[in-house]
Image (cartoon, rainbow, N blue to C red):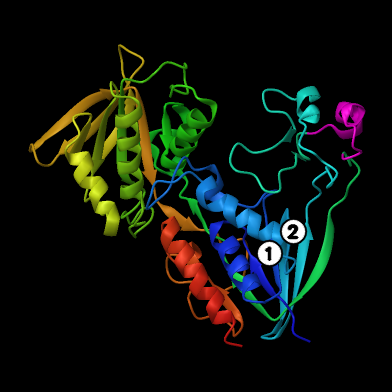
């Protein structure tokens, strides 16, 4: 039998591989650990190279998935075992209960009556969700002890007694598109991420900007809701550091320059300062760097930030930095600090060959093909290209 291609990971890379294969006439099964497809990109404010919002690319791909009968997908799905060989893999997949079935119309009544606060157990994530249906957090939900959602649902969509299950998928080959995650910022002790709410990661800042865009509201500090006047961006937070990540994550500089330019455009009174070792922007993104260098709201300072502490006499944060171009040590106050954290591979417990940094090697057991940012750090456009190339490799069989 000609078994389908299994794609592990439903982010932008996995979705790209799925639609390319299906539109070339191949059967595809796509699985994603989270309750929704879209991955990291679905929560972005915008992305390179055109600084489009997620809807620009994802919505088109969601439509391609909906309209193509060759694609089937499972969310809340994790691989628990792979056996067999090229052409006849057997993959065991564990499915988490969603507690809401496909009758859901996304009316939102379940979330409105949920007593869990401040975040209801029934939710749709803030990004571009697919499928557009609510899910219930099984850990937060009191289920039949509460059952208010059952009372208000008019479509019999609530299934509080749903149980986890296990299925077996037979696949001809496997594309691994498990993506990336941020390095844990709490491991950098001198930055005090864990106990300072106004010190956030670059991904959290991206989500903050996205939330402001969607809800048409002003950017504010997490600690007190006030509008910050001055924001610091610290590059290579945990990257190029033998105590943390020894490699460069390649996309952090571009992301930070994008963030600073976004602030300059939408918040002209807000000042940004970027502390960097080297600024590494490639291709079309170099134009963004030139634009930042000419902005009056953006200061680019070559110097490694050594420590962050709470200001003694104010509610600001003080950064201690060695300003290499000025040849002196500085201490300066900021309202918020954004850490440009490095990227790590999302291994998802798969037992595959990795390099010394933990990224999947290109060459694996015959029939298994890693794609995009689980192999090395990549931006969105590079990930899409690599996912397309990987889909082509599977069709050589």
Q: Quadrant of the N terminus?
A: bottom right
Q: Is residue 78 left or right of residue 389?
A: right
Q: Residues within 10 Å of mark 2 (few under 14, many from 20)?
A: some
On screen, 144 above or below 74?
above
Q: Nearer the viewer, residue 346 or 330?
A: 346
User: Residue 309's spot in the image, x, y percent?
Assistant: 33, 26
Q: Residues within 10 Å of mark 1 (few under 14, many from 20)?
A: many
Q: Is residue 296 left or right of residue 9?
A: left
Helix, strand or loop under label 2: strand
Considering only order in the chain, which callout, 1 or 2, is on the residue closer to the N terminus?
1
As drawn, the label of residue 30 is 1
Q: Nearer the viewer, residue 284 or 141?
A: 284
| Residue at image location 76% in from the left, 65% down from the top | 93
Residue at image mark 2: 74
Span shown in magenta: 141-157
Residue 233 lies in magenta, yes or no?
no
User: Residue 251's spot in the image, x, y percent?
Assistant: 36, 53
| Residue at image location 84% in from the left, 31% down from the top | 142
| Residue at image location 84% in from the left, 53% down from the top | 164
On screen, 233 above or below 236?
above
As drawn, the label of residue 70 is none
Helix, strand or loop under label 1: strand
- In three-dimensional space, the C-alpha distance between marks 2 and 1, rounded to whole angstroms, equals 6 Å
Asked if one can make out residue 351 in the rendered structure from this viewpoint, the answer is no
């Amino acid at each position: 039998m000609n078994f389908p291609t299994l794609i592990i990971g439903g982010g932008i890379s996995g979705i790209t591989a799925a639609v390319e294969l299906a539109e070339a006439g191949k059967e595809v099964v796509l699985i994603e650990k989270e309750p929704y497809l879209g991955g990291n990109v679905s929560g972005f404010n915008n992305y390179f190279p055109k600084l489009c919002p997620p809807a620009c690319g994802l919505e088109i791909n969601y439509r391609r998935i909906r309209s193509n009968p060759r694609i089937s997908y499972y969310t809340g799905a994790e691989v628990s075992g792979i056996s067999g060989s090229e052409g006849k893999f057997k993959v065991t997949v564990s499915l988490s209960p969603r507690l809401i079935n496909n009758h859901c119309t996304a009316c939102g009544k379940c979330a409105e009556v949920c007593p869990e606060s401040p975040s209801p157990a029934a939710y749709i994530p803030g990004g571009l969700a697919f499928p557009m249906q609510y899910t219930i957090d099984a850990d937060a939900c009191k289920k039949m002890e509460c059952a208010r959602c059952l009372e208000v649902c008019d479509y019999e969509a609530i299934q509080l007694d749903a149980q986890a299950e296990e299925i077996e998928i037979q696949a001809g080959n496997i594309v691994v598109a498990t993506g990336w995650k941020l390095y844990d910022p709490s491991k950098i002790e001198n930055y005090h991420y864990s106990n300072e709410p106004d010190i956030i990661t670059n991904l959290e800042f991206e989500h903050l900007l996205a939330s402001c865009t969607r809800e048409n509201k002003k950017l504010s500090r997490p600690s007190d809701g006030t509008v910050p006047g001055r924001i610091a961006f610290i590059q290579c937070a945990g990257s190029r550091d033998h105590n943390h990540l020894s490699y460069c994550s390649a996309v952090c500089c571009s992301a930070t320059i994008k963030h600073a330019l976004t602030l300059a455009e939408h918040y002209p009174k807000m000042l940004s300062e970027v502390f960097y070792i080297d600024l590494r922007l490639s291709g079309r993104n170099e134009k963004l760097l030139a634009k930042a260098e000419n902005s009056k709201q953006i200061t680019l300072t070559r110097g490694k930030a050594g420590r962050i502490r709470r200001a003694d006499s104010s509610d600001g944060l003080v950064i201690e930095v060695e300003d290499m171009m000025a040849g002196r040590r500085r201490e300066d106050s900021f309202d918020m600090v954004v850490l440009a954290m490095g990227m790590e591979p999302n291994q998802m417990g798969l037992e595959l060959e990795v390099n010394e940094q933990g990224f999947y090697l290109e060459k694996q057991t015959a029939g298994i093909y890693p794609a995009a940012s689980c192999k090395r750090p990549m931006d969105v456009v590079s990930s899409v290209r690599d996912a397309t190339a990987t889909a082509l490799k599977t069709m050589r069989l």
